[in-house]
Amino acid sequence: MTFSMQDVPRAVTVVGGANMDISAQAGGALAAGDSIPGTIRYSPGGVGRNMAENLARLGVPVRLLTVLGDDAFGQALREATTALGVSMDGSPCISGGRTATYLSMHGPDGEVAMAVNDMDILQTLTPARCAQTLTQMQHDALLLLDCNLPAPTLAYLLAQGHAAAVDGVSVAKCVRVANQLKGLFLLKLNHMEAQALTGLEVRSPEEAQTAARALQLQGVQRVLISLGALGVCWADLDAVPHFRASRPVPVSSATGAGDALMAGVVAALQRGAALEEAVAYGMACAEITLSSTFANSPDLNHAAVRQQQQRSFP
């Protein structure tokens, strides 16, 4: 299915987390109190930063408002992000602060055995720090938020009158917007986050559609509920919710696929696509990311997504 979109998308301002991901892959069985040979990889991450990178790769003018420490990780994140064309004007560097970091230990099968995150610096991304960036937003720009932000900052940003899209991030964090659902331009959740916000079981496409309808009744304009390998439920304004099944693509890593889905949907909407079109586009972005070993696929771009949409799978 081919859709028409504007050549020049409207801008997006992303406000959310940026962190350095450190992943260790053990070469053998893990044992408490012992070390083992393996591989360690550093890569830029964070839900907000990942979505900003993917938007830039898709040709969308994008600004990222986040907060970094004055350390080596902060410098590396800023350099890697701006090199992709993402503006970070207004993202402060906190003197003496530790840049957010996510450390994960993986067994030989690739599954996460344990992880530690240090995200305290995001608490310094206050309404006052966001105010100036908001005054510089283009009138037709979309505000894209992730729920890693402190609850007072989310509430402030959602009260400013800008069209706003929100990524729920996690069960514990998505409830931070529970009282600001009315009027949301777009809300993206996974099935567990949808359960947390609606109080409904969400295990099947039919249950996801019921949960999407419940969110519509709370005032959310557009709803996405990801069921992982099953597919995506979507609901547009007051229309009946729909479900689009996933295609059986090869999977190298699921890390970052949800961020790519959201970025793709937003990119398509900013090009003037209808939500049905945008979901198809976003799912193609997720497919490309699933086939990559990186959380942000270096192969992602508008042309590649169009090509991916035309591919057939057994």
Image: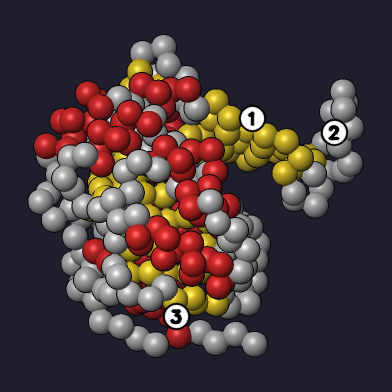
Q: Residue at x 43, y 16 (%)?
A: 97
1 or 2: tag closer to the N-terminus: 2
Mark in front: 3 vs 1: 1
Q: Is residue 198 above or below residue 134?
A: below
User: What residue sits right under mark 2 in the picture?
Assistant: 36
Q: Residue furthest top?
A: 96
In the structure shown, which secondary structural element does the residue marked by tag 3 occupy?
Answer: helix
Residue neighbourhood size for the residue with mark 3, other residues' Cα within 10 Å, grouped as few (<14), some (14–19), many (≥20): some
- Left or right: residue 298 versus residue 159 is right
Q: Which label lies toward us, 1 or 2? A: 1
| Mark 2 vs 3, N-terminal side | 2
Residue 210 appears in the picture as rendered: yes
Quadrant showing the C terminus: bottom right
141 or 147, which is in the foreground?
Answer: 147
At 47% from the left edge and 49% from the top edge, which residue is drawn? 197
Cα–Cα span, label 1 and label 2? 19 Å
Query: Mark 1 Cα within 10 Å, few/some/many (few <14, many 20+)?
Result: few
Which residue is under mark 1? 116
Q: What amino acid type should be assigned to the residue bearing mark 3?
A: Gln
* Amino acid type, residue under disc 1 in the picture: Val
Disc 3 marks which residue? 309
